[in-house]
Image (cartoon, rainbow, N blue to C red):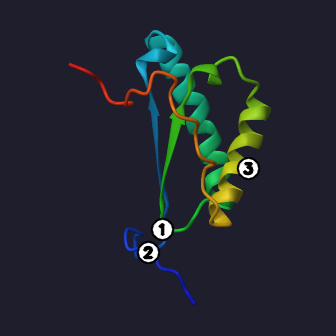
Amino acid sequence: MLLVNPLARPDGSLRFGVTVTKRIGNAVARNRMKRRLRALARELLPALGIAGADHVLIGRETGIERDFALLRQELEAALSRVAAGKGDPPRRPRPNGKSVGRSR
């Protein structure tokens, strides 16, 4: 059985996006994190990415201090989980029970 992603592009090209929240730090820190994630994406996605899919990399708080080789290993592991159809492991619920969205 062949699984087809209805959102995949027919030409098989892959794209990526990077997002980093303000919790990371000031603009300099956020831009540094984005540069690191873009470099990883350009290096790994052509070989390990899913053809026709959009890949979104999300910068987390500890990503700036983390060793670049460790970030590479983690992205490789994540891409191999996706290729195997396993996805991300479930996250634990927030301790205060509130939703992730912004409050107004």
Indicate which label's residue lies in the foreground, 1 or 2: 1
In the image, residue 60 sits, relative to residue 78, either above or below, namely above
Question: Image check: 74 left or right of 23?
Answer: right
In the image, residue 31 sits, relative to residue 40, either above or below, namely above
Residue 83 image point, x, y percent: 65, 65
Residue 42 image point, x, y percent: 60, 46
Q: Which residue is mark 1?
A: 52
Residue 19 image point, x, y percent: 44, 33
> What is the spatial separation of the Cα atoms under label 2 and label 3, in whole angstroms?
26 Å
On the image, which quarter does residue 62 sit in? top right
> What is the spatial separation of the Cα atoms under label 1 and label 3, in whole angstroms?
20 Å
Q: Earlier in the sequence, mark 1 or mark 3?
A: 1
Q: Earlier in the sequence, mark 2 or mark 3?
A: 2
Q: Which secondary structure lies at badge 3? A: helix
Instruction: Please name whichever residue, 70 or 87, is drawn nearer the observer in this view of the structure.
Output: 87
> What is the spatial separation of the Cα atoms under label 1 and label 2, in whole angstroms?
7 Å
User: Which amino acid type is marked by label 2?
Assistant: Asp
Marker disc for residue 11: 2
Disc 1 and disc 2 in contact, CB within 8 angstroms: yes
Q: Outermost residue, bottom direction?
A: 1
Residue located 57% across and 64% down the image: 50
Mark 1 neighbour density, 10 Å: few (under 14) some (14–19) many (20 or more): some
User: Which amino acid type is marked by label 3?
Assistant: Ala
Q: Which residue is mark 3?
A: 77
Query: Where's the C terminus, which quadrant?
Result: top left
User: Which amino acid type is marked by label 1?
Assistant: Gly
